[in-house]
Image (spheres, helix red, strand yellow):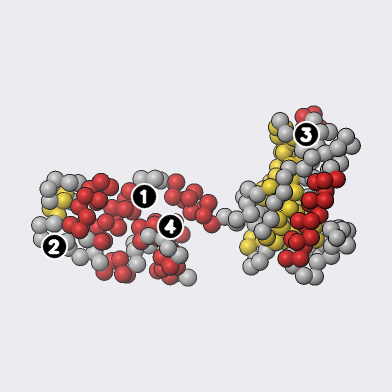
Amino acid sequence: MDSNQYYHSLMQQGYSSADAIHFTQQYYPNFDGPSQVMAMMTPPPPGSMEMGGMVTGGIGTSAAGVVAAGGGMSVATIAVVSVLVLGGVGTGGYFLYDYLTEPDFYGETYWTEDGMGVIFEENKIVYVLLADSYYEEFCDYFEDMGDGEYSSEYKKDGCYVTLTLSNDAEEKGDYYKICVPEGDDEECIKVYPSDGGAVIKDSDGGCDVLVSDIRNPDFDYDDEVSEDWQDDFQDKAADIEDDGPSNCDYDKLDYQ
């Protein structure tokens, strides 16, 4: 895909011309604008603008000036001024683009059958341990796991363990491939997000169901999830399993 094709794909998605130019230049720095925009850069009608970029009547080429000038400026001029205004945002535009293109399941808290939370983020996975037994001293234990891939933080509701990944999630159609460090190697899993949860498939075909559309788990005195929460989890997990990938081995789970 060349720069013009990328620009037109953004326009078809509903972006304005100025935004489409701005985002295209993130990937194609030499992109000066599509042929259609360049063709519109003709001199404005006589008297509409003076030399130096000043609109007749003393209104400058600021954002307010563009609004006030209205029809007195060519479409191309307005587009150029808009790009300049957006350029003033600096790296904000880049982070906005990154936010708009990251996987939808990032930042969502998914819960496992035993009440552990899993949060997928850019280049990392955060595990949430809320059971009462996870005191601050125990949380520090995770700092020594692996070869520096793990870090932990104790908050008022439990322990948050972060696993740093070497690569970000890779989109593969209906699932995302995520490779997790495992000793000197990596274990790659497939994440199938769905409404209310996700299915995790390992390299051996074994699958686990995670549920996001559920309240935070509560625990009994043995740090086991309560029976009520378990029943709610099983009901929701059964629906997610039905919508998940075929050829999965769910033998170790029982949601029926």
Q: Are marks 3 and 4 in contact (CB under 8 Å)?
A: no
Q: Residue at x 77, y 43 (%)?
A: 217
* Cα gap from disc 3 to disc 4, whole angstroms: 42 Å
For the residues labelled 3 and 1, say whether their Cβ atoms are less than 8 Å apart: no
Above or below residue 65? Residue 13 is below
Q: Is residue 233 visible?
A: yes
Neighbours of disc 3 within 10 Å: few (<14), some (14-19), many (20+): many
Which of disc 2 and disc 3 is earlier in sequence?
2
Please name the residue that numbered disc 1 is placed on: 86
Mark 3–mark 2 distance (CA, rounded to whole Å)? 70 Å
Q: Position of residue 137 (x, y in %)?
A: 80, 29
| Residue designated by label 2 | 45
Q: CA distance from mark 4 to mark 2?
A: 30 Å
- Closer to the N terminus: mark 4 or mark 2? 4
Q: Which residue is mark 3?
A: 139
The picture places residue 23, in percent across and down from the top left corner, at 43, 57
**Earlier sequence position, callout 1 versus callout 4:** 4
Q: Residues within 10 Å of mark 4 (few under 14, many from 20)?
A: some
Q: Which residue is mark 4?
A: 23
For residue 7, say whether it is visible.
no
